[in-house]
Image (spheres, helix red, strand yellow):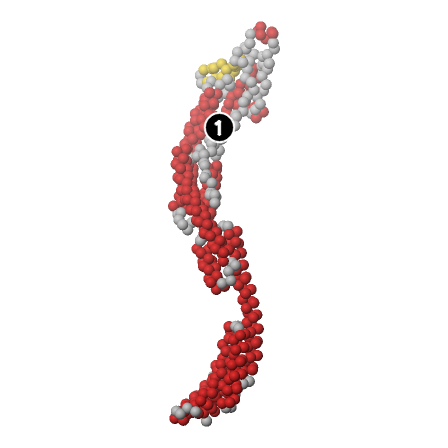
Amino acid sequence: MADETATISDNTTEPTEQATTPTPAPTPASAPKPHAPSPAAFAKKAVKRPAPAASASSYSDAEVKAAEAFGRVDDNGTVYVREGDSEREVGQFPDVSKEEALSLYARRYLDLKAKLDLLASRLHSDTVKSHEIDETLKSLEQETDKPAAVGDMAALKQQFEQLKEAGAAKKAELTKARKAAIAKAVEERTKIVEKAEALASSLDDEINWRSTADKFRSLFDQWQQHQRTSVHIDKPQADALWKRFSAARTTFNQARRKWSQARDVERAHAKAEKEAIIAEANQLKDSTAWGETSRRFNELMDRWKRAGRSDDDALWAQFRKAADEFFNARQADRDQISTSEKENLAKKEELLKKAEALVPVADEAAAKKARQALGAIQDEWDQIGYVPRDDMRRIEGRLDAVDKQIKAVEDAAWKKTDPEADARKSSFEEQLTAQLAELDEKIATESDPKKKAKLEAEKATKEQWLNAIK
């Protein structure tokens, strides 16, 4: 039988966690060029006005005015932002009013601050990842370094520094949580491995291979489910655990294959032995030596049981067919014999009626005549044949009783002519009288009909003897 448990292969590389793409911060509309184009360029092509920022509607007038307080626009359209005691040029927008230019750069500042606020919010999320924190901080560091915007740059930089500290703390928290999650995942997967190793170490001759294979399959399903749903375990740890699990599986698979091969050899031997038994049964099935052949078939059945189990029902059907042919023939013969014996019993019972009609006999002449008639009956009796076993003793006893009654008269007549008879007559008569008295007592106390009938037959015989010697 093929091994029901297929060898399991596993990619020990843990499922790769998908990086969470940080939610992009609000971005302003296309920024104006830092420097205004030359008059010749303006003459050839009109300058396109920048579109308002997409998030402009989300800022209140107070927020915009607060940011604008840190900037100014000169008559040439150049925009400046105040940083401490100095100013920094952030761009030039000569084709719009000063108010519009300053508002645009103020909104740029608010857009940038919104990105910082968004990161602050993400740091409180359970789904934020360490790489997301690093990437976002790196991007914001570039954006907050001399940005082309108008607003409180000192507050912006301070907020960024605070975010860096908060990001570092969050990363430490995530690292700690991940280590705890990895430790838990290693513990859970180790339990799966230990169960597999316990199964592999419990293999013996009494094991249920099918049930154990199902348990290994269930453990492998648990392994895969855990690999899919738990935190990613470091590859060296995952490889080491899988190596132990795979070794337990290999131990089981090798033991099962060895058992399966041994079972196949055993079944092949059993098949050959049973085919030999079938051949012998086919040679015996037509035998009419009922007793000896019945014994031989019983021996073949014992050999069949000792040969071992076989999955081939066809072999058993062949053996049963041969055995059934013999035993059915034997039963048919017995049925025929039984019918014949019953017929013989009826014939002998008719002869018994004739024999029992010959007694009692009164004297020697009558005894002699009865003996001749009984002899003829006995000859016919012997020619009839067997009767059923259960009736044999009964009818033979009845015929013997007739013979004994006639013989008693014959013996008594002989004793009358015997010179020593007179000397023994008195003693024999006393013995018979005492025996008859004893028989009367036994008959009176006997409750078994068969035993009572036997005692009465014995009494009748001895009464004949007593009558004969008087």
**Residue 263 screen position, x and y as percent:** 44, 47
The kind of residue tagged 1 is Leu
The residue lying at 59 percent from left, 12 percent from top is 47
For residue 225, say whether it is visible: yes
- Residues 380 and 223: in front is 380
The residue lying at 43 percent from left, 31 percent from top is 170
Q: Which residue has dot 1 on it?
A: 119
Determine whether 443 is above or below 142 in the image. below
Determine whether 291 is above or below 254 in the image. below
- Residues 276 and 103: in front is 276
Figure label count: 1
The residue lying at 49 percent from left, 26 percent from top is 116
**Residue 363 screen position, x and y as percent:** 50, 91
**Within the image, what quadrant is residue 325 found in?**
bottom right
Determine whether 217 is above or below 29 in the image. below
- Residues 209 and 105: in front is 209
The residue lying at 49 percent from left, 18 percent from top is 147
**Residue 132 screen position, x and y as percent:** 47, 28
**Residue 124 screen position, x and y as percent:** 47, 33
Badge 1 marks a residue whose secondary structure is helix
- Residues 414 and 53: in front is 414
Furthest residue toward top: 40
Is 334 left or right of 166, judged from the image as shown? right
Q: Residues within 10 Å of mark 1 (few under 14, many from 20)?
A: many
For residue 186, say whether it is visible: no
